[in-house]
Image: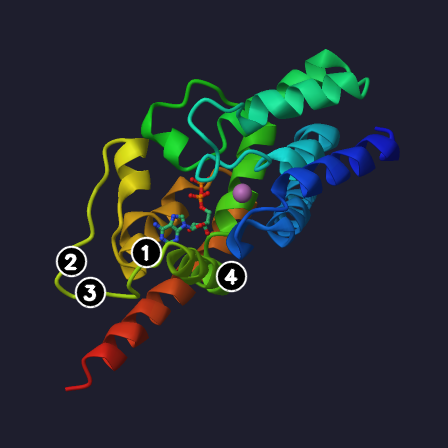
Amino acid sequence: MKKDLQDAAVEFAKKKMAAFDAGHDWQHIERVRRMARHIQHKEKAGDPDVVELAAILHDIADSKFRKEDAEDSGSMAYRFLVKQGLDPVKAKAVRNVIDHISFSSGFSDREFDSVELQIVQDADRLDAMGAIGIARAFNYGGYKNRALYDPEREPAQYDSPGAYRKSDAPTLNHFYEKLFLLKELMNTTTGKEIARERHDFMVAFVEQFKKEWNPT
Ligand code: ADP
Ligand code: NI
């Protein structure tokens, strides 16, 4: 693939994401891109161009910030890539990854699958786990003005993306509602291996947190 196209995609994504909170800023994209590349090398599968472009463009219209009727990331990425002269078949493959990557779209059965989706989705999920995942969760909670923890509030099980999004639960609940579930959702062998360490680290963190909350 032309290096130019990657550079143009980076510029495009940076511009689109300039308004997001720090949990979803440009550094998230760089980390997902590096991790996706790493998983792809290890797994020796998938089209590297599709993986790279999907990682760069996967959050350009984050649903948490976007108005209901605004264009989604997948369609925006597709239009951009075709306009840049990319083969529409490849552009569609990128779009398919972006359309199906998110945790909240996992509420319905998977209606699309590809190696590239498995790789980029693992990379995106891994960035919500471990030390960085913890930092991102509390950063997001702060942005939304949420409590760190409330022992009175039981973690919930959401049955729709809307209910999941609307929740104003304390940030510690997010570990039970999403972050602890990610380990089981990993697609690739490489992703599973990395997830194990990050999962255990989060479990230890939450244990320590609760111990400090109730010292007696
Ligand atoms: P996805 O696109 O997979 O649904 P999000 O965009 O919801 O993921 O999440 C982006 C980051 O913000 C992740 O690190 C995630 O854990 C964090 N986050 C999302 N919702 C919450 C929440 N209710 N409380 C704390 N952190 C959250
Ligand atoms: Ni992401």
Dot 1 or dot 3, earlier in sequence: 3
**Seen in the image, is 144 located left or right of residue 198?**
left
How far apart marks 1 and 3 lie (CA) works out to 13 Å
Question: Is the residue marked by circle 1 packed among few (<14), some (14-19), or many (20+) residues within 10 Å?
Answer: many
Identified at 19% across, 47% down, the residue is: 156
Label 3 sits on residue:
150
Residue 132 numbered tag:
4
How far apart marks 4 and 3 lie (CA) works out to 22 Å
Q: Indicate the quadrant of ligand 2 in the picture.
A: top right
Amino acid type at circle 2 is Arg
Question: Is the residue marked by circle 4 packed among few (<14), some (14-19), or many (20+) residues within 10 Å?
Answer: some
How far apart marks 4 and 2 lie (CA) works out to 25 Å
How far apart marks 1 and 2 lie (CA) works out to 13 Å
Q: Is residue 101 visible?
A: yes
Label 2 sits on residue:
153
Q: Mark 4 or 2, which is nearer the eye? A: 2
How far apart marks 3 and 2 lie (CA) works out to 6 Å
